[in-house]
Image (cartoon, coloured by chain):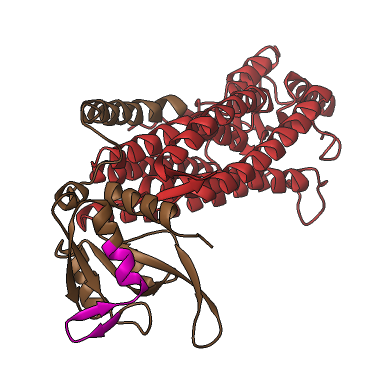
Amino acid sequence: MSQSHSRPRGAALIGMSLVLGLAGCSKAIPVDPEGTLDSVRNDTLRIGLSPNESLVEIKGSSYQGSEVQLAKDFAQSLGAKAEFIVGGEESLVKKLEEDQVDLVVGGISSKTPWSKKVGMTRPYTQIIDEKGKKEKLVLLVPPGENAFLGELEYFLDQTQEMP
Amino acid sequence: MKPEAGTHLPEEQQQLMRRATKLEWISIGYAACTITLVALVVGNSQAMRTAWVEDMLSVLPQVAFLTAGIYVRKSRRPTHPYGYHRTMSAGHLVAGVALLAIGALLAYEAISALVKVEHPTIGTMNLFGYTIWQGWLMIAIMTMLAIPAVILGQLKIKTAKPLNNKLLYADASMAKADWQTNVASIVGVGGIAFGLWWLDGVAALVISVGIVRDGWTNTRSATVDLLDRRATSYNGKDPHPLIPELEAQLRSFGWIKDCGIRARELGQVLHVEAFIVPVAVDLTMSQIHEVQAALEDTDWKAYDVVVTPVLELPDFFSQPREVKK
């Protein structure tokens, strides 16, 4: 039995390893399938803002709050200018999936159900919500853009105190 | 008839059973470590998740073996005249069906992730102040875990053969092939590393197809045994090598004109019915007894031997062999 199933599976494994070997001739790892990090660097970071009391305050055309600042700082670290798109969480998540924004901030908790659809950073800080419960905050990124996510998490590791 | 169940195994086999039991406990302990370690890094890779579930499933045949091990020792009684040997086959069937069902589910998940073009997201971990991509940890852990299962499998195969135990043999074969799952999950994560998101789904599919195949083989073999098919050996060799051996034993009696052995499996032992056609009709009790003793002495696997003198052999012995697919 072991032989009968090692052959087809073995062939599949060899095939897949070959593909990997060929792909290995490219650059830094991990690679973004859609190239988000490369397109943002020294260009524009499109930031989705979901309004939130103190983290993302929207007064007319001025955007304030700690997460707005965080996003601006990240853009700066990539040499990119920040571009803001305001919207509700659901529409911003959709924009992430459709590659229309690169980052979504707005007091998103680490338990967000959106993590099934898009990428999510590790929690970068902890707050106490209205009900007095501890909540860990995360940022949302496009799904599967692992180089971009890695870069953002590195930035958070360097600038934030993780809980 | 031989003495009570539980004492039916010769000393060597009893020792092997103890060894097999020990190996199965070690396997379960090892699986517990694997499951915990992989849980720490499993993340969003479909291939990793599939490999993780496979690790959990790998415990099923071991649990079945250990549970059955408790029952097969029980002696027979009026309500269970054949003893409890078949608990091994029942365990085998349960393990097979579970593998089949969950394997199919995982294959479906892998395919649907591919169809929906889901890009797996794998972030970083902060290890001692360094930001490290989790994929590296996955690959490291899967590499580390690839070897021990193979060694355990090898050891189990060595005990399964002399024990004539199909459940143990199936479990061992699965463990021996387990490294392929690890390699596949490494390839999947490697694919994500290079931006080839689909390689993850393909790897997951390869792993789940392997699980389905294991499930199918086990379910089929266990079902066929429960249907009282002619006994086969631990690796499915048909007929069981003991059958021609017993027939030769019968033919060595000068007064037997014609004979046939009907044997079915009771777990790791065989229930044997010997049909004999004597040369003369004045058969004595002592002759029958002699035949029965000779058959039982041939091998420990000839556990439950019944000798039936007949005027001519039942037709199923003379019917042409079924054409094998």
Q: Is residue B209 above or below residue A61?
A: above
- In the image, A141 versus A77, the foreground residue is A77
Does residue B230 appear left or right of residue B76 in this picture? left
Write down the quadrant of residue B191 in the picture: top left
Q: Count of labels shown? A: 0
Does residue A52 appear left or right of residue A127 in this picture? left
Q: Is residue B40 above or below residue A27?
A: below
Q: Is residue A134 above or below residue B136?
A: below
Specify whether residue B55 is painted magenta: no
Instruction: Give the brown chain's letter.
Output: A
- In the image, B12 versus B174, the foreground residue is B174
Question: Does the rendering let one see residue B227?
Answer: no
Residue depicted at 50% across the width and 26% down the height: B238
Residue depicted at 86% across the width and 36% down the height: B3
- In the image, B83 versus A113, the foreground residue is A113
Specify whether residue A70 is painted magenta: yes
Q: Position of residue B282 (x, y in %)?
A: 76, 25
Q: Position of residue B288 (x, y in %)?
A: 78, 27
Chain B shade in the render: red
Residue depicted at 30% across the width and 60% down the height: A73
Residue depicted at 22% across the width and 31% down the height: A23
Q: Position of residue A130 (x, y in %)?
A: 49, 87
Q: Position of residue A60 (x, y in %)?
A: 18, 87
Does residue B191 appear left or right of residue B86 in this picture? left
Magenta-highlighted residues: A57-72
Image quarter (top left, top right, bottom left or bottom right) of the C terminus of chain A: bottom right
